[in-house]
Amino acid sequence: MASIKESDGETITFKSLGLTDVLCEACLALNWKIPTDIQREALPLAFQGRDIIGLAETGSGKTGSFALPILQSLLESPSRLYALVLTPTRELAFQIGEQFEALGAGIGVKVSVIVGGVDMVTQSLNLAKKPHIIIATPGRLVDHLENTKGFNLRSLRFLVMDEADRILNMDFETEVDKLLKVIPRERTTYLYSATMTKKVAKLQRASLHNPVKLEVSTKYQTVAKLKQYYLFIPCKYKDCYLVSLLNELAGNSFMVFCGTCNNTQRTALLLRNLGLHAIPLHGKMPQAKRLGALNKFKDKSQSILVATDVASRGLDIPHVDVVINFDIPTHSKDYIHRVGRTARAGRSGRAVTFVTQYDVELYQRIETLIDQKLSLYPTVEEEVLAMMERVAEAQRHAKMELQESSLEKKRKGLEAEEKKKPYAKRRKVDTENI
């Protein structure tokens, strides 16, 4: 790997930035040989105790830029419940937790991940052990502050808000306000965001003291090794083109992005019915299944991950070869995050965006944002539509499976309601008319 030189010719290393030896060794163990741009900017200021606003895209190494100063400070003055990291999604919380555990393995750091979809009692027991670092989604953390006896954040020294723009876009403002009221004013705060929206600027004024602003890669852009294509197709043939593309590029690993949870589930079932190894990942899945799907894709036992934008930011899966935008993103910036799942760490990658007759304006916005014209992906329509009959059959099966799944959920919901009633008032659940 090429080394980064300072103006006097010396190589910039984690050690030269002020990182202690034990954490330098932890970085090497993670194959972090030299600091990224955001780490080079942030670490010296963080070691001085400054509040930081970091504007950096996903994949820029920003987790290291806030985790390393926190761990170094913890080494110098050990204490429980030392830092809180807020994230917008459960998957990102677990990933940050894994990085903290890896970096802090040599110094005995205890990390607790607090997210929805996991048993509250188990989490309460973990919090009772007073971990050093809590990584949490705002909603579940507020639940514990209001309902878990003995839990508070009064000894907190560091607050990190990662992907702050997305935390606020997901309507966590009320929860963030509640948290800011109960954590110490005397603390160090790091706010990391891909964009500086009005909401993020307001949050900055409310929570940071004389912060220094760092900006890395201000222009919206995609990496040079990413080959970007589009397919202009009638909406009714989207499934056919997807199956054709997956067959043509068989042997690669794919992330297929859909716009809704329902379409994600439907598409995954459709592909399975055609013998393709696809797994869904979306917000309506139980947390255990979400993590299971992610792990199967990460360990390469499944080669096609069909996902909503819950998987578009923050997740580090280095081996993705092809990103397919099956449903074009409504927000142009989400295109950057989606295609950023491939061509990572110097690797090459491909992205193909499906554009129907209803998506032309959204597609033009994307080209304007990235200041680039996408290439037309070469296909032969006759060959694609030759599999129309097989795809139509798979569509019918997928629709039936979705309906059966929906009925089963309704039945379980009614049974659960019955169990809540006093015994004398219970009636047998009538499932015939669901």
Image (cartoon, rainbow, N blue to C red):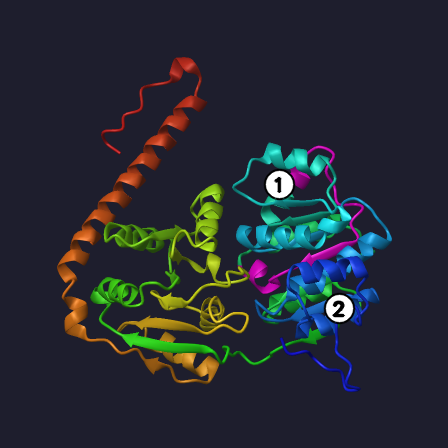
Looking at numbered disc 1 in the image, what kind of residue is underneath it? Answer: Asp
Say few, some or many: other residues with alpha carbon within 10 Å of mark 1 (under 14 / 14 to 19 / 20 or more): few
Q: Position of residue 256 (x, y in %)?
A: 37, 62
* Residue 185 in view: no
Residue under numbered circle 2: 14
Picture layout, residue 370 above or below residue 86: below
Which residue: 52% across, 70% down? Answer: 344
* Residue 1 in view: yes
Q: Tell which residue pokes out farthest to the right in this image.
A: 77
- The image quarter containing residue 99 is bottom right
Which residue: 43% across, 45% down? Answer: 285
Label 1, secondary structure: give it. helix
Is residue 314 left or right of 180 when viewed as pictured? left
Q: Position of residue 164 (x, y in %)?
A: 61, 62
**Real-space CA distance between mark 2 and mark 1, rounded to the nearest whole angstrom:** 38 Å
Picture layout, residue 80 above or below residue 253: above
The magenta segment is 144-169
User: Image quadrant for the C terminus?
Assistant: top left
Which one is in front in this view, the residue at disc 2 or the one at disc 1? 2
- The image quarter containing residue 362 is bottom left
Label 2, secondary structure: give it. loop
Pick the front one: 157 or 178: 157
Q: Position of residue 36 (x, y in %)?
A: 66, 72
Residue under numbered circle 1: 143
User: Image quadrant for the N terminus?
Assistant: bottom right
Is residue 197 left or right of 322 when viewed as pictured? right
Looking at numbered disc 2 in the image, what kind of residue is underneath it? Answer: Phe
Q: Position of residue 251 (x, y in %)?
A: 34, 63
Label 2 vs 1, first from the N-terminus: 2
Say few, some or many: other residues with alpha carbon within 10 Å of mark 2 (under 14 / 14 to 19 / 20 or more): many
